[in-house]
Image: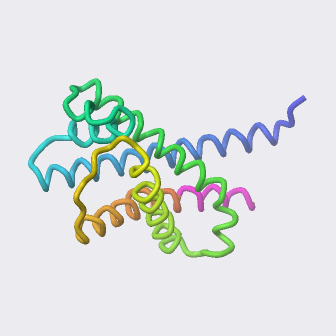
Amino acid sequence: MTNPRFKQTAGKAIRTVLLGWLIAGTLDICAACTQYFINTGKGPQNVLRFVASGYFGKEALSGGWEMAAWGLLFHFIIAFVITLVFFLIYPWLKKWIGNIPLMAIGIGLAAWTVMNLIVVPNSNTPPIHRTTLSILIAMGILIVCIGLPLAVVMARYYRKQRT
């Protein structure tokens, strides 16, 4: 027999993770596509195919919308993992970093570090040239589009859990 309070708490936790995931994932991919458009004048398909190339390799870069769809799926899977990990470690982080803006910076920089120093180098994506400015812009996007929404959504959830 399941405790009704557990069901209610689990449901709220699941909704919180899903909300954070959809907000952060959507903001991040929109920002990445916007930045790409500003830099190249090209649409989002190339960004999404690049994400797909992490699994499919260089062939994804010349693929059509099906590869872009794979890229979008992979993007949201990665965003979900980041959201879930942050949700699980939030209580611990809250003890060390009580400030939402600092937490957003930490989440964004952690996401950038894991993606750019671990995930991407160990995937099938072709190497890309990065400048200091492009790195700082990418970090800023992750801080604002992933770190900040997740910090706010999780803080709200855990604050309600205490009451």
Residue 8 lies left or right of residue 70; in this view the side is: right
Q: Residue 156 appears at what percent x and percent y?
A: 59, 59
| Residue appearing at x 28%, y 24% in the figure | 66
Query: Image quadrant of residue 112?
Result: bottom left
| Residue appearing at x 46%, y 55% in the figure | 118
Residue 6 lies left or right of residue 1; in this view the side is: left
Q: Residue 52 appears at what percent x and percent y?
A: 34, 36
Q: Nearer the viewer, residue 49 or 153?
A: 49
Query: In the rendered structure, does residue 14 fall within the stretch colored magenta?
Result: no
Residue 142 lies left or right of residue 38; in this view the side is: right
Q: Nearer the viewer, residue 102 or 60?
A: 60
Screen quadrant of the C terminus: bottom right
Q: How is the image coloured?
A: rainbow
Magenta residues, start to end: 153-162
Give the total of numbered labels: 0
Q: Residue 61 appears at what percent x and percent y?
A: 23, 35
| Residue appearing at x 51%, y 43% in the figure | 80
Screen quadrant of the N terminus: top right
Task: Name the dominant secondary structure of the magenta segment.
Answer: helix
Q: Residue 46 appears at what percent x and percent y?
A: 21, 39
- Furthest toward the right, the residue is 1
Query: Image quadrant of residue 6?
Result: top right
Query: Image quadrant of residue 138?
Result: bottom left
| Residue appearing at x 48%, y 67% in the figure | 104
Q: Nearer the viewer, residue 77 or 162?
A: 77
Residue 72 lies left or right of residue 103; in this view the side is: left
